[in-house]
Amino acid sequence: MTELAVHFLDAAATRAARGSRSEAASAINLLEWLTVSIAQDRAAARFSQWGRSTVVDENVGKPVLAQAAFEYLHELAGVEASWPIGNAGVLHCYGYLLSRVSTPYGLKRERWLGADLAQAYDLGGDAFIPWRGQGTLLERAAGAASALLRSPAASRSLTLDGRESRVALTAATGPAALAYAVASNPGEEPRLVTTFPVADAAAILEEFDAEPRLRWNAL
């Protein structure tokens, strides 16, 4: 089942990257589990838990998702967006599933389809497979990341232009899950931006302290 689902995801991602709005919509609509998940998240107002992100990846310097797919995903989610800036939940959960752009860390979707992030959260290896399990991918990711931000093994926070950002890790050294949140406006509580596995938690903390800035495509 997983191999077949990944095959259909690959086909949809390739088709959605061709550029036209109709092509992107048709490709995404073929993934029923994806459109149903987004509809459920929209009905539950879950996208409001997430902050802003750019689809231009800081490591590769280009968009990791075609504009047509970016726009259609936000339309399904009922969230306003202006290319290349959108809702972090839409992009980091569902957009990354459709990304075919390689980064220094591989494809963005591997955090969800692979076992590393789930196991770093002390969950089963398939905990974030989007077409399996209870709840949507966005719901599961938000639950894990929010819990980590509340009770981290190690964390840092900083304020830039009145906006607080927080990074939390499941361990202070070695491999860990990372969760990151940034306030959208001064004085507000930070909103989720991303979660992913890291190989060296201590290096993340050191870099966060050394260079105060927004990270991991947050805006």
Image (cartoon, rainbow, N blue to C red):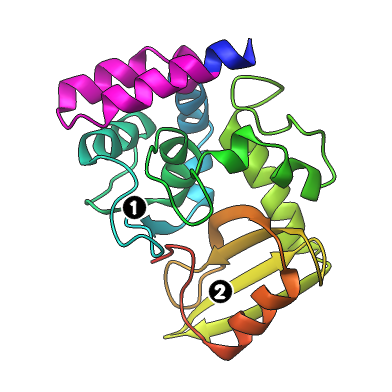
Secondary element under disc 2, as helix, strand or loop, is strand
- x and y, in percent, of residue 190 in the image: 56, 66
- Camera-side residue: 151 or 196? 196
Q: Nearer the viewer, mark 1 or mark 2?
A: 1
Secondary element under disc 1, as helix, strand or loop, is loop
Can you identify the residue that label 1 sits on?
A: 55
Number of numbered discs visible in the structure rendering: 2
Three-letter residue code for mark 2: Ser
Q: Taking 42 as reference, is 76 left or right?
A: left
- Camera-side residue: 147 or 1? 1
Using a 10 Å C-alpha cutoff, classify the residue at mark 1 as few (fewer than 14 neighbours), some (14 to 19) or many (20 or more): many
- x and y, in percent, of residue 157 in the image: 64, 79
Residue drawn at (51%, 86%) of the image: 212
Indicate whether 21 appears above or below 193: above
Residue drawn at (58%, 90%) of the image: 210
Return the mark for residue 165. Answer: 2
The span shown in magenta is: 6-34
- x and y, in percent, of residue 105 in the image: 53, 54
